[in-house]
Image (spheres, rainbow, N blue to C red):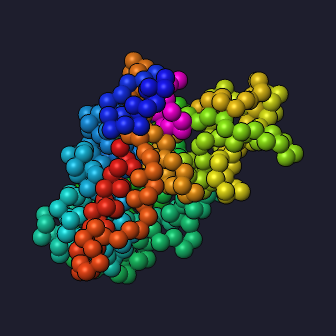
C-alpha cells in the first residue's frame, strides 16, 4: 500500500487504479454507476416530453465525466465566463449562460462560446442586446415571479424580499418597450432549491398569471434549477405534466437546468479519524474540514448523511465530528455509532459529489481532497491529486515576466493562472 500512496502523489496519478480502502484520505469518490442511473432518469424525461435538460455546472463540474453526461443531456449552463468556457471546451453541446451582471471585458468571449445569453435586468439586456443579435445568439431575460416556495433558507430563495435575481412584472412592463420585448427569444426563472414538482407547479401558476401573455411570443421558457428529479420521492409524472402544459399552451421549447439532480447521491467523501478529545462530550477530529471541503454544511446549514452512523439517540456511542482547522465552528455534526471510534477509522460521508468539489478552499493551508472515480466494476481511478503547489499558487505572486513589464501583460498572466486554477480544481 505504501507504493500505491507514493504513486498517487506522482504525475501519473490519473492513470492509477486502486481499491477504495487503499485511497489516501480525504478524497471525493464519484460513483460512475450512480451517476449513470441519474442521467438515465433525466434522459427519460427528455424523451417522454421533448424538453431539454442542461447540466448546471455550479453544482457539479467534474469535466472528466462530461463525455458521459453529454450522451444523456443536451448541454451545460454556466454562471460566469470560466464555467462557460469549461462547458464549451469539454461538453461541446448547447451552452447557456446567466449572470446577474456581465463584465464589459468578457462579453465578447461569452458570445463566442454561448448560444443562449440570459440577462438579469432590463438594463443589462438593453446594454448588450445589439451585440447578442449581431453574434446570432438567442437571448432571454430572467424573471422573478415573486412566488416564494422555500421556508427557512432565505439565502437560497431568489424570491425573497429585496432579491437581486430576476425582473419583476412591474420592472418588466415599466422598463421595456413593446419592441424590446419582441426582441426577447425566451424567459428564464429559477426559484427552487432541492424541491419537488409540486413547488414547480405552484411557481408555474405564478409565472403564467404574471407573464403568460408574453409567453405566446417567446421561443423558449427555461424552468431553471432546483428540481430534485432523481430523488426517490420526486413526483416525475407531475413534472412531465408541467412541461407538457407549457409546451401545449404556449408553443415554446422547455429547458431545465438541474445541477444536484445530475449527481445526487453519486459520490462520497472518505475521511479518517485523526484524534479524539473530550470536553463535555467526545469529539473526533477528522482530516476533512466542513469549512474547506464541505462548506454547504455551514452555509445551508445541513447535516450530511454518514454511512453506518445515525442521529445521536440511535446508537450508544456519540461523537461530535469536526475538522482540523483553527475555525471553532468547523463542525460537521453530532453522530452516533454502534461501536466506539478510534484513531485511524475511516468514515464515508454520502451525497458528496454536489456543491463540494466546486466550493473547496485551502483555508489554513488545508490540502484539497483527491478526486477519484469509482468505475462501475468497483475499481477506483484517481483523477486528480492536490499538493502544496495548489495551495501556494492560489496566493498572489509577481508575474514571471518581471517588475518592469506593463500592467497589461501582468494582468494577462494572472488571468491565465486564474483560468488554469479554476479548471484544475474541477477535474
- Side of 335 relative to 231 (left or right): right
Q: In this view, does 306 lie to the left or right of 334?
A: left
Quadrant of the snapshot with the C terminus = top left
Whether residue 205 is visible to the viewer of this picture, yes or no, is: no
Residue 146 or residue 381, whichever sits in front: 381
Whether 27 is among the magenta residues is: yes
Relative to residue 157, is residue 245 drawn left or right?
Answer: left
Could you say where residue 248 lies in the image, as x and y percent from the top left? Answer: 30, 47
Residue drawn at x 22%, y 58% is 114
Residue at (73%, 29%) from the top-left corner?
A: 342
Q: What residue do we see at 62% from left, 29% from top?
A: 346
- Is residue 249 covered in magenta? no
Quarter of the view holding residue 148: bottom right
Q: Which of the two residues, 329 or 58, is positioned nearer the viewer here?
A: 329
Q: Bounds of the magenta span? A: 20-29
Of all residues, the one furthest to the top in this rendering is 377
Residue nearer the viewer, 128 or 427: 427
Q: Is residue 255 left or right of residue 170?
A: left
Q: Position of residue 333 (x, y in %)?
A: 70, 44
The count of marks equals 0
Q: Residue at point 25% right, 80% down? A: 404
Amino acid at each position: 500500500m505504501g507504493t500505491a500512496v507514493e504513486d498517487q502523489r506522482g504525475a501519473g496519478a490519473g492513470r492509477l487504479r486502486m481499491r477504495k480502502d487503499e485511497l489516501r484520505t480525504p478524497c471525493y469518490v464519484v460513483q460512475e454507476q450512480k451517476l449513470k442511473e441519474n442521467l438515465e432518469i433525466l434522459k427519460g424525461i427528455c424523451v417522454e416530453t421533448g424538453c431539454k435538460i442542461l447540466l448546471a455546472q455550479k453544482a457539479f463540474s467534474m469535466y472528466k465525466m462530461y463525455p458521459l453526461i453529454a450522451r444523456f443531456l443536451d448541454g451545460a449552463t454556466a454562471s460566469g465566463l470560466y464555467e462557460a468556457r469549461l462547458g464549451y471546451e469539454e461538453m461541446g453541446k448547447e451552452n447557456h449562460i446567466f449572470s446577474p451582471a456581465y463584465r464589459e471585458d468578457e462579453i465578447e468571449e461569452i458570445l463566442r462560446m454561448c448560444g443562449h445569453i440570459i440577462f438579469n435586468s432590463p438594463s443589462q439586456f438593453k446594454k448588450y442586446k445589439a451585440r447578442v443579435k449581431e453574434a446570432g445568439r438567442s437571448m432571454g431575460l430572467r424573471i422573478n415571479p415573486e412566488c416564494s416556495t422555500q421556508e427557512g433558507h432565505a439565502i437560497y430563495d431568489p424570491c425573497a424580499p429585496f432579491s437581486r435575481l430576476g425582473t419583476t412584472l412591474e420592472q418588466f412592463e415599466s422598463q421595456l418597450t413593446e419592441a424590446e420585448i419582441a426582441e426577447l427569444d425566451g424567459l428564464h426563472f429559477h426559484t427552487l432549491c432541492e424541491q419537488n414538482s409540486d413547488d414547480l407547479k405552484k411557481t408555474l401558476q405564478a409565472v403564467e398569471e404574471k407573464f403568460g401573455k408574453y409567453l405566446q411570443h417567446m421561443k423558449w421558457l427555461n424552468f431553471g434549477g432546483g428540481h430534485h428529479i432523481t430523488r426517490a420521492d420526486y413526483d416525475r409524472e407531475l413534472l412531465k405534466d408541467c412541461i407538457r402544459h407549457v409546451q401545449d399552451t404556449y408553443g415554446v421549447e422547455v429547458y431545465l437546468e438541474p445541477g444536484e439532480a445530475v449527481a445526487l447521491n453519486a459520490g462520497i467523501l472518505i475521511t479518517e479519524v485523526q484524534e479524539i478529545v473530550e470536553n463535555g462530550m467526545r469529539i473526533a477530529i477528522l482530516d476533512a474540514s466542513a469549512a474547506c471541503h464541505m462548506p454547504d454544511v455551514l452555509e445551508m446549514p445541513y447535516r450530511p448523511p454518514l454511512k453506518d452512523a445515525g442521529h445521536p439517540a440511535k446508537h450508544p456511542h456519540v461523537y461530535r465530528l469536526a475538522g482540523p482547522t483553527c475555525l471553532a465552528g468547523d463542525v460537521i455534526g453530532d453522530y452516533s455509532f454502534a461501536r466506539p471510534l478510534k484513531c485511524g477509522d475511516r468514515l464515508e460521508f454520502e451525497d458528496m459529489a454536489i456543491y463540494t468539489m466546486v466550493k473547496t478552499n485551502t483555508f489554513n493551508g488545508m490540502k484539497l481532497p483527491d478526486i477519484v472515480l469509482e468505475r462501475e466494476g468497483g475499481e477506483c481511478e484517481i483523477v486528480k491529486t492536490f499538493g502544496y503547489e495548489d495551495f501556494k499558487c492560489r496566493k498572489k505572486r509577481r508575474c514571471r515576466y518581471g517588475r518592469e513589464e506593463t500592467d497589461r501583460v501582468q494582468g494577462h498572466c494572472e488571468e491565465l493562472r486564474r483560468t488554469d486554477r479554476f479548471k484544475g480544481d474541477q477535474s
